[in-house]
Amino acid sequence: MKTKTLLELVTLSTTLYALSKETNIIEKLADAAEKGKEKINDFARSKVTDEDGNEVEFLEKLSIKAGEVRDEIEAKIAELVASFYDKVNIAHTDKIRMLEEQIKDLRKDLSLAEAKINKMDKKAD
């Protein structure tokens, strides 16, 4: 159990390190900060309507926009984490479990093969 926790902590720390080194995110945040004031004003002036054609209040518009931004950020983080795992080639715990099961199966096969060899040796004597 300690090994699993240690592996997860190492994986998390390396992922955070890779994300902190991603200069692309920092550059995008700087650009967004520069353009932020204009975008906020445009957003506040824009008219968004619901299904009934009624204009949505500012807080509802803000909530909708926050959901869209959250989805975009989650997609970007998922993309970065996937590329990081490809670069570092870290085995997932599922892969480790699969390999452990394959090792168990191979040990069983080896035991059966040894038993057959012993049986053939006894017949040869």
Image (cartoon, helix red, strand yellow):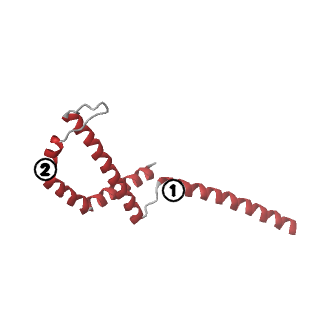
The amino acid marked with disc number 2 is Glu
* Secondary element at image label 1: helix
The amino acid marked with disc number 1 is Lys
Residue drawn at x 40%, y 60% as measured from the top left: 85
Residue of label 1: 95
Query: How many neighbours does mark 2 have within 10 angstroms: few (below 14), some (14-19), or many (20 or more)?
Result: few
Residue 60 % position (x, y): 24, 34
Residue drawn at x 15%, y 50% as measured from the top left: 36
As drawn, the residue found furthest toward the front would be: 53
First in sequence, mark 1 or 2: give its number: 2
Residue drawn at x 20%, y 34% as measured from the top left: 59
Front-most of 10 and 35?
35
- Horizontal side of 117 relative to 46 (left or right) equals right
Residue 30 % position (x, y): 17, 57
Front-most of 105 and 63?
63
Instruction: Name the front one of labels 1 and 2.
Output: 2
Front-most of 92 and 40?
40
Residue 55 % position (x, y): 22, 33
> Can residue 125 be seen?
no
Tally the marks.
Answer: 2
Residue of label 2: 38
Q: Which of the image's four quarters has the C terminus? A: bottom right
